[in-house]
Amino acid sequence: MVRRSEGLALEPLWESPGAPSEPVDCRGGTLPTELATRFPGELTIGLCPERPTIIANFVSTLDGVVALGPNEPTAGGGEISGFSNADRFMMALLRALADVVVVGAGTVRVGRRHVWTAAHLQPAHADAFAAWRSALGLSPHPTLIVMTATGNLDTTHAGLNAPGVPVILATTRAGAERLSGLPLGPNVSVAALGDDSRVAGGALVELIRGTGARLALCEGGPHLFGELVRARLVDELFLTVAPQIAGRDDAVGRLALVEGMRFGEGQGRWSNLASIRRAGDYVFLRYRLEP
């Protein structure tokens, strides 16, 4: 696989002239010099005053595929992006700003060795990301929240056992009972949020709020993202468009969000394109979702 974005900066192409006025409270700003060489300009995210802000980050093929089947040799975002270094850098930037990273159990299963930190994605810039988080007054790493209705997880997964990374397994009552019989590291806690087969988006927000977090990053999968969108809880979407066509009718995840598209009759969300960047053949879109 050719890494066509290796070492390239995420060049700004366009920013919405109708962007909302500067929020009273925000996260980010000017990047440290080492990081700014790859991401010129500022990265600022407005924070909601009444609840934790939730942003999402996905990479999609040109035909809209964001996830392959669980039986694929590699079914995560790396396969979708063509293992783009620029996409991994964008992911690392968002993780560096977040108090919490939220993923579904399916995302954990396909990322067998993944650790949900900025340093894992960009080890060469680990010190710069750590310094930026420290300057922003953030903990060394965001808390990882894994959404699992059943509690069916490999508790030896690298991402659940990374030193210094707090992990919360958000599950149902039945899932919590299953997890109680499994060996969990001292950094892992279990939160039973649902009594049936799913964990509602509102319960997740309350869990995030309970950690003291102001900014949560959702990295999928698409079903978790859809749940949060339907609950009108997603504030922004960062979408990388990779220059490849999957051509797969059996893809398990597609992201149906483009400018002005409705998610469903009567309960959709309008999205407003906020900015466009590029790195080689890759396009980086930022959308703000209307309440």
Image (spheres, helix red, strand yellow):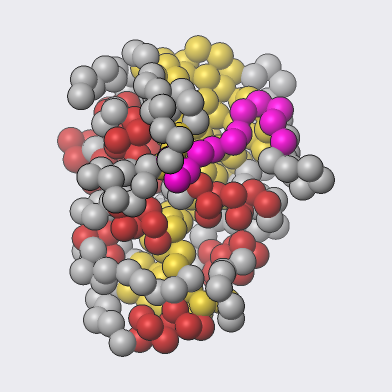
- Looking at this view, name the residue that lies furthest to the left: 124
Residue at the (41%, 27%) spot, across then down: 247
Q: Is residue 126 magenta?
A: no
Residue 41 position in % (x across, y down): 45, 22
Quadrant containing the N terminus in the rendered view: top left
Residue 216 position in % (x across, y down): 51, 53
138 or 3: nearer the eye? 3
257 or 129: nearer the eye? 257
Above/below status of 276 relative to 255: above
94 or 179: nearer the eye? 179
Quadrant containing the C terminus in the rendered view: top right
Which quadrant of the figure has residue 185?
bottom left
Which quadrant of the figure has residue 103?
bottom left
Magenta range is 251-262
Mark yes or no: residue 170 visible: no
Residue at the (56%, 69%) spot, across then down: 198
9 or 106: nearer the eye? 106
Mark yes or no: residue 69 visible: yes
Which quadrant of the figure has residue 86?
top left
Q: Is residue 161 left or right of residue 145?
A: left
